[in-house]
Amino acid sequence: MISSSDFRTGLTLEFDNGVWQIVDFQHVKPGKGAAFVRTKIKNVKTGAVVERTFNPNEKLPKAHIESRAMQFLYENDGMYTFMDNETYEQSELAKEQLGDALKFLKENMDITLNSFKGTIIGVDLPNSVDLEVTDCDPSVRGDTAQGATKMAQLETGYSVRVPLFINQGDVLRIDTRTGNYIERA
């Protein structure tokens, strides 16, 4: 059990028939009344983010998330095959289980697979991935207004806004948390 006064970002809790991860928290001591803890929590299974307040002496059960290092091997008929890096055991996940991770997933990529009580609840990608540009508009000479961008399609099918100097065939570093262009790799 964890007291709400001991909350920290990234902590996973088990309550309301689900597993929740703390995205943000703040201890509040108003001038009048009792102190409380204001939190932003994310449902690990659905991805829904909710704001909730707790009393500082409230205790909640900690959710024990098992993380395993896996490598993405291939996709076949909507099923994605991963291999455990330690035991070489293979697991298959459906497209729905991967969610937004599909935008950045490419073969032989190392990821972390998270499970709770034997049920896979999600994957953690590296903070950035290098993806090749497969399609983008050519740059127009003289179109160099401040912060000008264009759309580029990457090898995974994901489209991202990039600076005008990016061309087809360039390899870009993309932030997997926000989906934004970082730099040329």
Image: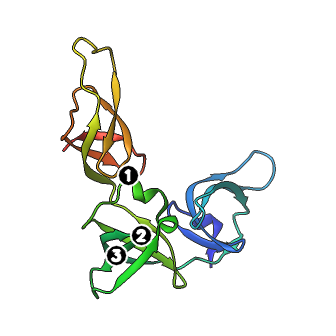
Q: Nearer the viewer, residue 53 or 100?
A: 100
Q: Secondary structure at mark 3?
A: strand
Give the Cα separation between the discs numbered 3 and 2.
Answer: 14 Å
Q: Nearer the viewer, residue 155 or 10?
A: 155
Give the numbered dot on residue 77.
2
**Which numbered disc, 3 or 1, marks the residue closer to the eye?**
3
Q: Circle 2: is it few (<14), some (14-19), or many (20+) Cα within 10 Å? A: few
Task: Indicate the amino acid at tag 1.
Answer: Thr
Residue 36 at what x, y percent from top left?
71, 57
Residue at the disc numbered 1:
176
Which numbered disc flags the more N-terminal residue, 3 or 2? 2
Which numbered disc flags the more N-terminal residue, 3 or 1? 3
**Which numbered disc, 2 or 1, marks the residue closer to the eye?**
2
Marks 3/2 in contact by CB < 8 Å: the verdict is no
- Which quarter of the rendered picture does the C terminus lie within? top left
Residue 83 picture quarter = bottom left
Q: Circle 1: is it few (<14), some (14-19), or many (20+) Cα within 10 Å? A: some
Give the Cα separation between the discs numbered 2 and 1.
Answer: 25 Å
Which numbered disc flags the more N-terminal residue, 2 or 1? 2
Q: Secondary structure at mark 2?
A: loop
Task: Indicate the amino acid at tag 2.
Answer: Asp
Q: Secondary structure at mark 1?
A: loop
Q: Nearer the viewer, residue 24 or 35?
A: 24
Give the numbered dot on residue 80.
none
Give the numbered dot on residue 82.
3
In the image: residue 64, left or right of residue 3: left
Residue found at x 38% / y 47%: 158
Task: Indicate the amino acid at tag 3.
Answer: Phe
Residue 60 at what x, y percent from top left?
66, 74
